[in-house]
Amino acid sequence: WNSYNLTRSYQAGGAATLGLNVFNDNGAVTQSGDYEIVGQVRNNGTQRAESVEVISTLYDANGTVVDCEESYIYTTDLNPGETSSFKVTFSQRASYENVAGYHLHIQGRPTAVPSATPAGVDILNNHATYMDGSALRVVGEVVNRTGSSIDSLRVTADVFNQGQLVDTELTRILNSVVAEGKVCFKVNFWPAPANWNSYNLTRSYQAGGAATLGLNVFND
């Protein structure tokens, strides 16, 4: 081939402005040669935003597009006032050393009624430790005191350096449907962030899930 042509198609209208805002974001080339952007999204609007995704564009010093990629925020959906982290990874080029800047576009689908989640799900007994000197692991427990099972349980770990987000990772509990009681989790960062001094854990979940079955451990 020796040339190409681009066309675009679209329709008028679409989703209303949701009041989604990006903050605490930064991008850099990783040790493996990928380019990663981490940040947080807050819903400052009055509507629930579903299927929230971050569309990222990389530019060189001349303003030429280097690459583009998209990723959903970790909680996927945001009620008014809620915040979620995200990570966008670019890994399809030989080198990203010529990246001079990026642009983030946030979009989602508005829903009029916020989704209620029952209170009583808490993160307990967590700590961070280094694994073999090259990875950082955060382990802990989530306790469900809602009185019923919960579904789609996730734990997000955000790592900060003096308040600036430097990395974020998401884990799904081994069984995302969790009955009353405690279940453990772990979040791995590999490689470990070079400079960090604190971390924050958040959990997201939905009401419902499988009914409690009355399963009991004994003779252990």
Image (cartoon, rainbow, N blue to C red):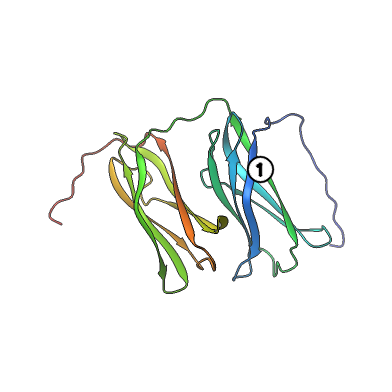
Q: Which residue bears the numbered disc 1?
A: 106
Q: Measured from the top left, where is residue 19 in percent x and y?
A: 65, 35
The local crowd at label 1, few if under 14, some if 14 to 19, many if 20 or more residues have their Cα within 10 Å, is some
Q: Measured from the top left, where is residue 182 in percent x and y?
A: 29, 47
Above or below, 98 against 58 in this view is below
Residue farthest toward the left in the current orientation of the protein: 219
Q: Measured from the top left, where is residue 55 in percent x and y?
A: 67, 48
* 70 vs 106, nearest the viewer: 106
Q: Identify the residue at horizontal 47%, vertical 72% (top origin).
A: 134
Residue farthest toward the top in the current orientation of the protein: 112
| Quadrant of the rendered image containing residue 4 | bottom right
Q: Identify the residue at horizontal 59%, vertical 28% (top origin).
A: 46
Q: Measured from the top left, where is residue 191 in percent x and y?
A: 51, 68
Question: Which quadrant does the C terminus fall into?
Answer: bottom left
| 30 left or right, relative to 4 | left
* 215 vs 198, nearest the viewer: 198
* 155 vs 5, nearest the viewer: 155
Residue farthest toward the right in the current orientation of the protein: 3
Above or below, 105 against 91 in this view is above
Q: How many marks?
A: 1
Q: Identify the residue at horizontal 84%, vertical 62% (top origin).
A: 1
| 25 left or right, relative to 122 | right
Residue farthest toward the front in the current orientation of the protein: 162
Q: Secondary structure at mark 1?
A: strand
- Camera sees residue 91: no
Above or below, 108 against 138 in this view is above
| 159 left or right, relative to 39 | left
Q: Identify the residue at horizontal 66%, vertical 43% (top origin).
A: 106
| Quadrant of the rendered image containing residue 143 | top left
Give the residue type that dot 1 points to.
Ile
- Camera sees residue 135: yes
